[in-house]
Image (spheres, rainbow, N blue to C red):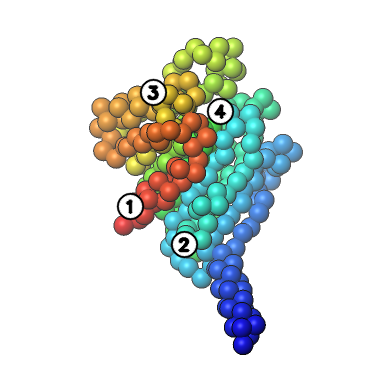
Amino acid sequence: MKNFLLSVLFSCLLLVAQAQQAAYQLKENISYAGKEADAYSQERCVLDLYFPTGKKDFVTVLWFHGGGLTGGNKEIPAFLKDKGIAVIGVGYRLSPKAKVEDIIQDAAKAVQWAYQHLETYGGNKNKLVLSGHSAGGYLNLMLALNPRYLKEVAVPEQAILGIVPFSPQCITHFTARAEQKVDINQPVIDALAPLFWVRKEASPITLITGDRELEMVGRYEENAYLARMLKIVGHQQVKLIELDGYDHNMVYPGLPLLWKEIQNWSK
């Protein structure tokens, strides 16, 4: 009898696992580069789409990986799986093979792909959340604050439900400064800085950083200044969260906060 019960329990657990697995689908290496793109763009400008099947009108998170705009690969954070939302892991070109301006435009094209194709999979193209860590968070903010990038790819700002960058650079990114032969510790705020584009019309923004004493040099302060300036120009939905005790590697403690914001914005 004991073996029989164990067999039944195992069968039930297997069925539950299979049901959970069947509820979601992963499509990998979808190109958003366009047919005329060069070989390097074709290689890097791809995304993975993880989405719930049999469901409609769901939120989609576009997750941009970190790596200083010089490294890293597309990824889908495990914490965001099985939560009734879609997650897109975005790849993009890297410096020095691509300029920072080109990388931002890659990010915009990935958002364009989501806006144009999500309804095919049951998603709501007007419920996009931009998120990502470090360099990925920088790309989030450049798309959110400089209206030119999304306008050029015909994505309305209203399609962006919110932005949750994890420890983003808010001054000009150090890789962009390197292109200009500027020292990594020399702060610059020019057109490649999110701070240059503060405006009240941007979608809701929740900035998350590690502990100011443990983070990368000045990273918390950059985010605090951005939050303050957004409030000064009249932005009504900006929030800054500092994760005490965590350094720049603060992705996991940030992910539950991202999920909380998604739930709040979806009400």
Does the CB distance between marks 1 and 2 fall below 8 Å? no
Which comes before the other along the chain, label 2 or label 4? 2
> Alpha-carbon distance for marks 2 and 3?
35 Å
State which quadrant residue 95 falls in: top right
N-terminal of the pair, mark 4 or mark 3, is 4
Q: Position of residue 235 (x, y in %)?
A: 28, 35
Mark 1–mark 3 distance (CA, rounded to whole Å)? 26 Å
Q: Please state, as top left, top right, bottom left or bottom right, where the C terminus lies in the image.
A: bottom left
Q: Which is closer to the viewer, label 2 or label 3?
A: 3
Which is more foreground, mark 1 or mark 3? Answer: 3
Q: Which residue is mark 2?
A: 84
Identify residue for label 1: 264
Find residue 101 and name its label.
4
Q: Position of residue 173 (x, y in %)?
A: 51, 23
Q: Point out residue 78 in the picture as x, y percentages from the top left corner.
A: 55, 52
Report the residue that reaches farthest toward the right: 39
**Numbered label attached to residue 211:** none
Residue at 43%, 18% (x, y): give it. Answer: 189
For this view, does 208 lie left or right of residue 201?
A: right
- The amino acid on which the numbered mark 1 sits, given as a three-letter code, is Asn
Q: Is residue 20 visible?
A: yes
Q: Earlier in the sequence, mark 2 or mark 3?
A: 2
Residue at position x 55%, y 12% in the image: 183
Left or right: residue 99 compared with residue 243: right
Q: Does residue 154 show up?
A: no
Is label 2 in a helix, a strand or a loop?
loop
> Which tag is nearer the camera, tag 4 or tag 1?
1
Q: Which residue is mark 3?
A: 221
